[in-house]
Image: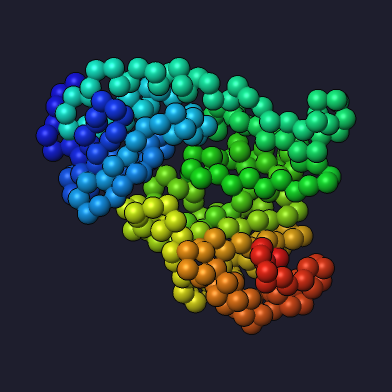
Amino acid sequence: MAIDPVNPLIVQSDRTLLLDVHAPGAEDARAAIMPFAELEKSPEHIHTYRITPLSLWNAAGAGFAPSDIVTALNTYTRYAVPAGILEGFSDTMSRYGKIRLISPEQLTGAPPAAAAVHQSSPKDVPLESATEVATIAVEFRLADWYTNRVIEAMKKRGGALVAVDVPDIRGLPPAIDVVTDKTSYIRLHGRNRESWLWGSDSAARFDYLYNDKELESWGDRLQRIVLEADRVLVYFNNHRKGQAVQNAQTLIQILDKTGLSGDLVKAKGVKHDTTGDLPF
């Protein structure tokens, strides 16, 4: 492998990754390693990531293979990857998906109550059937899952594909309003792009206050969603400094002006609830 001194990534023997945020290609490198490495520190110039067993399992769950990790490291490393660091990736990642979490009813052959199943790839999604006693909502954190195959599987099995509001960053879920179940679930995480990319900790991602224009756009989207869903739940996850409550109250006011939270929703038998998930 050729050494490129302008590359942004330094790979250390303890599986620590140092990202020079000012080097060419730093953002591409960050996007490439984010699925399989955990951010530990993010000072001004050099950010520290670490590859751990948990981060490897998360990568496997998102459909990454050990060869994908090797390719990413070799593509962006500034110096030669230390000998032996790549050993063990296959062994660790191969353990993902070998444990299924099922209910006692499933063990006895009775109708299942609920199940959470680890899948090895977004290309192979035999989702468990939704039950009559619970609504299953699935939130994917990577854009790779938002495919026609997955959407059609969700519709067939009866699960709600969560619509998410996140920063416009490559690799994160896209902005789509697909209704796959009679209940539609929306989660707004904030659009704090800088903190999402370079924040000092994960909680900084959710330190965001939506402005009225951003919430008004959701008013328009909800008018389309409510035509297909019997029930719509909106959850604000921008909770770092209590912004969620303020934004929820603002959204209710916006919906009141459009009539969406009034006559239309009342006809669907849904009432306001400002204490948690907000059904509109």
Residue 214 on image: x %, y %: 48, 70
Residue 250 lies in quadrant: bottom right
Q: Quick check: 13 left or right of 150? A: left
Residue 249, placed above or below residue 268: below
Q: Quadrant of the N terminus?
A: top left
Q: Quadrant of the C terminus?
A: bottom right
Residue lying at 58% horizontally and 40% vertically, measured from the top left: 148
Residue 94 on image: x %, y %: 50, 19
Residue 20 on image: x %, y %: 20, 44
Closer-to-camera residue (135/217): 135
Residue lying at 34% horizontally and 36% vertically, measured from the top left: 50
Residue 52, placed above or below residue 201: above
Residue 157 lies in quadrant: top right
Residue 220 lies in quadrant: bottom right
Q: Quick check: 122 left or right of 168? A: right
| Color style of the picture | rainbow
Residue 44 on image: x %, y %: 22, 54
Residue 126, placed above or below residue 198: above
